Image (spheres, helix red, strand yellow):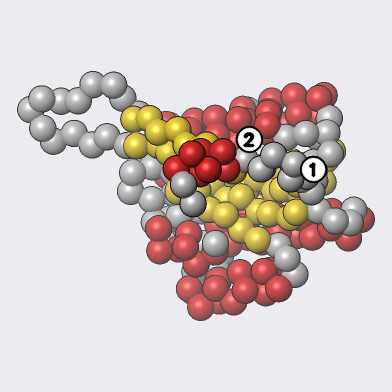
């Protein structure tokens, strides 16, 4: 495919997290690349409504900038949803809290969801498996009542679980069973030292 044809199909934007670097060395910069798939002329189709569960780690290890960044990312996602989409929000520390499940994302509900997420505070311990599975249960419940949805669990966490299911084989099997039901998981690692091993097992 020629470069001019690629540009018609994909939109690419790259930017660094900071414009300046430390001339003495020892600094780390992050490059963010946004890739947007564009429909070809004459082939634009309306996307399927989304059925999402945002599962947010509010454990002690997420306190401070990590939780702030997770909440910021979640709010940005909420603001991008349309009135045809459905959203559940779950947070977890030691316990799991379902803030709402299968809510239609009209304007007032988007504002409500953003306020709830922005108000999250940290709690003790990290019951990641229970939070993730509760988010999947919310998505599955919406699938039972509304058809033809694209269903997805989005987990925002540093990946350091210390209670709940910790066995990697068991977590991988849960993820496989969910995919068979067309419930998919994406994980967003929060912080520079997040545990990629556990998060990869769920995605």
Crowd tier of the residue under label 2, counting other residues whose Cα lies within 10 Å: few below 14, some 14–19, many 20 or above: few
Of all residues, the one furthest to the top in this rendering is 20
Mark 1 and mark 2: Cα distance apart in space: 19 Å
Residue 109, x across and y down, in percent:
81, 29
The part of the image, by quadrant, that contains residue 106 is top right
Crowd tier of the residue under label 1, counting other residues whose Cα lies within 10 Å: few below 14, some 14–19, many 20 or above: few
Residue 74, x across and y down, in percent:
60, 36
In the picture shown, does residue 181 fall above or below 189? below
Of all residues, the one furthest to the right in this rendering is 145
Residue 48 seen in render: yes
Residue at 73%, 65% (x, y): give it: 182
Residue 51, x across and y down, in percent:
76, 49
Residue 66 seen in render: no
Image quarter in which the C terminus is found? bottom right
Secondary structure at numbered mark 1: loop
Disc sitting over residue 77 in the figure = 2
Query: Mark 1 highlights which residue?
Result: 46
């Amino acid at each position: 495919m020629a470069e001019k044809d690629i540009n018609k199909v994909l939109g690419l934007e790259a930017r660094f997290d900071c414009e300046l670097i430390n001339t003495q060395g020892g600094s780390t910069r992050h490059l963010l690349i946004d890739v947007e798939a564009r429909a070809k002329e004459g082939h634009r189709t309306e996307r399927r409504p989304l059925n999402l569960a945002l599962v947010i780690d509010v454990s002690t290890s997420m306190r401070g900038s990590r939780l702030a960044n997770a909440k910021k990312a979640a709010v940005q996602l909420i603001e991008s949803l349309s009135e045809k989409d459905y959203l559940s929000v779950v947070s977890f520390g030691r316990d799991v809290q379902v803030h709402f499940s299968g809510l239609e994302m009209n304007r007032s509900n988007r504002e409500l969801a953003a306020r709830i997420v922005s108000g999250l505070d940290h709690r003790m311990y990290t019951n990641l498996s229970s939070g993730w599975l509760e988010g999947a249960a919310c998505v599955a419940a919406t699938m039972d009542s509304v058809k033809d949805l694209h269903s997805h669990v989005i987990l925002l966490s540093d990946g350091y679980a210390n209670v709940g299911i910790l066995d990697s084989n068991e977590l991988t099997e849960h993820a496989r069973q969910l995919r068979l039901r067309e419930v998919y998981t994406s994980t967003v690692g929060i912080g520079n030292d997040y545990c990629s091993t556990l998060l990869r097992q769920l995605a």
